[in-house]
Amino acid sequence: MTSAYQALARKWRPKTFADLVGQEHIVQALQNALAKGRLHHAYLLTGTRGVGKTTIARILAKAFNCTEPQQGEPCGQCASCSAIDQNRFPDLLEIDAASNTGIDNIREVLENAQYAPTSGKYKVYIIDEVHMLSKSAFNAMLKTLEEPPPHVKFILATTDPQKVPVTVLSRCLQFVLHNMTPQQVATHLAHVLDCEGTPYETPALHLLARAAAGSMRDALSLLDQAIAMGAGAVRERDVRQMTGSIDRRKLYALLDALAEQDGGQLIALAREMGAYAAGFEPVLAELALLLQELALIRHVPAALEGNPEQAQLARLAARFHPEQIQLYYQCALHGRQDLPLAPDEYAGWLMTLLRMLAFAPFAAADTPADGHIENTAFRTAPPPVSARLAPSADTVPRKQFRPQDLPPPRPQEIRRVPHTSGATAPPPAPADDAPPPWDEDEAPAPPPPHTPSAEHAVLPEPPHNHAPDDEYVLPRPYDDDDGDTVPHDMMPHDGALPAPPQAQHANHDAPDDAYILPRPYDDNDGDTVPHSMMPHDGALPEPPQAQHTNHDDVPDTERAPPPLERESWFDIVAHIGKQVAAAQMLLQHLAWVSLEQHTLTLAVMSEKTKDADNREYIGRIAQALQQAYGTDLRVCLTEWHDDCGETPFLRRERILAERRETARQLLENDAAARTIMHTFSARWRTESLCLRD
């Protein structure tokens, strides 16, 4: 009578630490602990399925109870080892937490744990998939896990350690099992087949190893299936058909067609592969893996030594530039990611190949494989707004417009409607022979211009069809539908009709339904004044164009530094600001205290900056001062107190507040602004006010 067949995964289950494949980091730690007698009361083994968690737990249980261990290795011959291998050891209890999740099951285990072992040295409890236990079951285990009886050992195993409470994790020695590499799996499968006397093809074992995804148990199960499918032999053709893997020779032909830029051959191969492929997701995965091997053999040829396909890989790698291989690899990854979004899988697969065909910078026949792509350096960051607006030698400087430079308003563009008993008279129609408003040469002579008051902070725009970058265009509240009449319900309460801004400040290029208002203050704008350029007396500075008319071409480092004294501190900060780089933030919060014997003492507002104790930044400031003044100057920081002067940051905030207050007063004194405020029951947003120069 023939004996019952035993699956390879059970037959070749390791029985000692020496039989384990991989997991050397865990084996060494456990063997050393067993050899020195440093036995913990609870162990937690984590890892994906089939990597050896339960196997290591059983070997560890044998090592605990072995009567003749050798350097932490169980002998496998004593009564305890034999009983554990035959699943009849009374002091070893294996619990499946997936089917025994309740507190009653755990309570029974904990009650039996109080009794001494029957035949072995220790009572060992192996709880598999421990993360499936309920919260109450975990709570019941805590006390026993922390202070177990001296004859009890717990070995917990789980594939999801994140679900295990941290109170349990902290009471265990945790070991993380790694997935096995395809090479390790293939080597072990070859050893098993040699011992079993089963013929095999080496490429088939590599296919099984990749399909197992790091799990030795899955690899042995697939090997059983492959032997059955091949009638006692493991062949590559059968394994490809079983796992749905694509024949690599087809992928080689595919890459050859890409190298030749042969679109017809590429489409023919794509259709042929689509006829028998189980799905295109594994095909793209196999293609990406092949491209990864091509990149590897391109850069590190020794990494694929021993690979049976090394010669073919080397031939293909020589046909492509390394950058082209990287490009195709990215196309394969993105194509695999886009498959669910494609109309169907074949369309996504075909578009991926067409993308490779289109993005082939080195596939042309006249381009050498050792060429390189030019101009691939990173582009520098664009210049700031102020630098882009600054005039250069080959550009025309932008004119500084003033309200009095504007042309006067045209009579036909400004039509005021008298307010009579709530009715609005229609505007007079222009004469038939009147010139069109856009005809500048034939327009009638304009009346004398209306000079605006100094209170109106209105800037015109340059003559083009849209508002310039330094102006906002906001809707005009006076216009209703046609832009010429004013609805009665928008009139002021006193019945007076304020003059539209166009009548006060003519601007022919702005749209009829818009006002032009200044932009808020911006530190980074080229048309505003940074704090480092403001005078010390707090007065409003001149526009930057007026200050730097003759110095645009002179770098800050070539200008003469200001005097090294307290009154020039803000100019000093502006002079060395660009040289200290990242220390500028700290520099803005420093105030001059004293200068004595080549030691400059500065007070720092530590609550404003986190870099107050950064010695590197302090050294940069000192070095910039030494270069500017040519002297051995030391910088010493002290704590801030009320008697210290202003920092550049505080000075900027003060001047901005003064400018906002001035702008608010000018607006409150303006009749048109008061009318708008009264009509719409509006209020000023103080933080958005600014005073334009």
Image: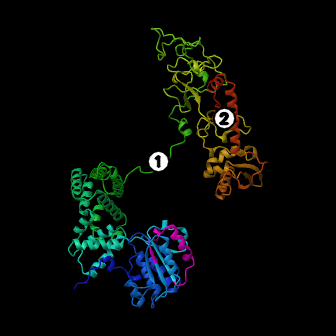
363 over 402 or under it: above or below: below
Magenta region, residue range: 126-151
Tell me where residue 206 appears, x and y as whole percent.
30, 70
The verdict on residue 137 being magenta is yes
Check disc 2 and report the residue beneath it: 686
Q: Nearer the viewer, residue 39 or 444?
A: 39
Q: Quadrant of residue 256?
A: bottom left
689 over 269 or under it: above or below: above
Q: Nearer the viewer, residue 408 or 315?
A: 408
Q: Nearer the viewer, residue 632 or 479?
A: 479
- Residue at the (33%, 62%) spot, across then down: 289
Amino acid type at image mark 1? Arg
124 over 281 or under it: above or below: below
Label 2 Cα crowd, 10 Å radius (few <14 / some 14-19 / many 20+): few
* The N terminus sits in image quarter: bottom left
Tell me where residue 66 appears, x and y as whole percent.
45, 88
Q: Quadrant of residue 560?
A: top right
Instruction: Judge left or right: residue 503 versus residue 649.
Output: left
Amino acid type at image mark 2? Thr
The circle drawn on residue 379 is 1
The circle drawn on residue 499 is none
Tell me where residue 432 appears, x and y as whole percent.
45, 8
* The C terminus sits in image quarter: top right
Label 1 Cα crowd, 10 Å radius (few <14 / some 14-19 / many 20+): few
Helix, strand or loop at mark 1? loop
Helix, strand or loop at mark 2? helix
Q: Quadrant of residue 224?
A: bottom left
Tell me where residue 382 appears, x and y as whole percent.
50, 43
Find the distance from the CA under tag 1 to the CA under tag 2: 40 Å
Which numbered disc flags the more N-terminal residue, 1 or 2?
1
Instruction: Judge left or right: residue 204 versus residue 626.
Output: left
Q: Nearer the viewer, residue 438 or 54?
A: 54
